[in-house]
Amino acid sequence: MSLPPLVEPASELTVDEVRRYSRHLIIPDVGMAGQRRLKNAKVLCVGAGGLGSPALMYLAAAGVGTLGIVEFDVVDESNLQRQIIHGQSDVGRSKAESARDSVKEINPFVDVVLHEVALDSSNALDIFAGYDLIVDGTDNFATRYLVNDACVLLGKPYVWGSIYRFDGQASVFWAEHGPCYRCLYPEPPPPGMVPSCAEGGVLGVLCASVGSIQVNEAIKLLTGVGEPLVGRLMIYDALETSYRELRVRKDPECAVCGKNPTVTELIDYEAFCGTVSAEALDAARDSTITVRQLADMMDRGDDFLLVDVREPHEYEIVSIPGSVLIPKGEIVSGAALATLPQDRPIVLHCKTGARSAECLAVLKGAGFADAVHVGGGVVAWVNQIEPDKPNY
Ligand code: ZN
């Protein structure tokens, strides 16, 4: 399936632009008309992180005339392993400003528009309205459903990518010509089931593999060349170096793009997706302590067992003194419950508090009534108590 170009050509290229884009101009499928379409194009990139970095850099180099960047985070040292639009001297700076400076350095002819806000139901439609297509570089389900629904409601193509460890996926969702993200994934995964890259890790170069597929799709849609990934899910395995492709069909019962949609305006996506399960929220409500309280308990010499529910390779990076490693899987399966003491309080912690809250719910259900977990996990511990230790 080929589609007509998304964008009308700009009136003309300047002499400087002709020189800059000459390697595009001599490709017959792109040519002067295609490059003028890119010049007229307005592309929004949601996130200037792992996928947003290569996406923004190649969109800029390709000569996309207007690039919008939605990003409100700050550059952290742990970003630099994969977020190559930022450099060492950008640590601590606004990611949006750092990304803008890199884009301008790559191609001064690009207009950059910064949206330094958290994208949500109140602002997504207004922001998206000014762009031809949306490239998604986010890593959480709430934002994906938000971006998808806003694109369906506005009739815009959604160039999606996802990365985890060595696995990448990409597709183009465009309800007018094929399925949307909800046709593929009608429901978000249960909270706590799918680890994020911050929890599970990601091979840095995988961002380039998937981000470049996204840029390739964006350029094809803008200029109307080739076969877009509409209705196809690309699955990349970096360990095997193999690509697979799955057909994705439009779901006539889809909640947002089906025949009788139930989602006709943007909803509360945080509530829709959750970040931890209802059971975990319930268990943690009166049983969460701060890292400062944990430090005080240690200083007083209180008798308790500190259980780290992360994975062994995380424990190797950094741990809280005196903690015992029992990975979440062994608690959730029940295998480790018999080894836990009944005669003294149990304090659970993980990286940031999500996994430990899930484990807390299991422990409460198994009768460990005075178990608690540490809000913010080892990340908060390092930030507030032992700042000389590494964080990740
Ligand atoms: Zn759909």
Image (cartoon, helix red, strand yellow):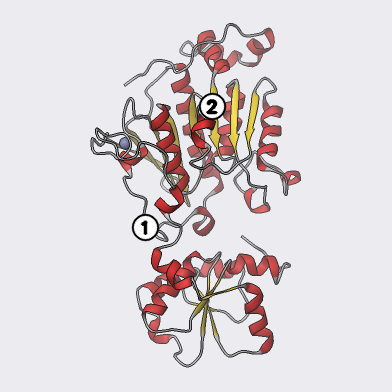
Picture quarter containing residue 49? top right
Asked if disc 2 is less than 8 Å from ligand 1, the answer is: no
Q: Nearer the viewer, residue 127 or 377?
A: 127
Residue at 62 percent across and 75 percent down: it is: 320
Residue at 51 percent across and 9 percent down: it is: 33
Q: Looking at the picture, which amino acid does disc 1 mark?
A: Pro
Q: Looking at the picture, which amino acid does disc 2 mark?
A: Val
Tell me if residue 51 comes above or below residue 198 in the rendering: above
Q: Secondary structure at mark 2?
A: strand
Question: How far separated are the C-alphas under marks 2 and 1?
Answer: 32 Å
Q: Position of residue 237 (x, y in %)?
A: 41, 45
The residue at which mark 2 appears reads as 43
Circle 1 packing at 10 Å, graded few (<14), some (14-19), many (20+), is few
Q: Nearer the viewer, residue 147 or 137?
A: 147
Give the quarter of the figure containing the N terminus.
top left
Give the quarter of the figure containing the C terminus.
bottom right
Residue at 56 percent across and 16 percent down: it is: 40
Q: Earlier in the sequence, mark 2 or mark 1?
A: 2
Picture quarter containing residue 65? top right
Marker disc for residue 190 = 1
Residue at 58 percent across and 6 percent down: it is: 11
Q: Is residue 230 left or right of residue 16?
A: left
Circle 2 packing at 10 Å, graded few (<14), some (14-19), many (20+), is many
Q: Quadrant of ligand 1?
A: top left
Tell me if residue 204 comes above or below residue 229 in the rendering: below
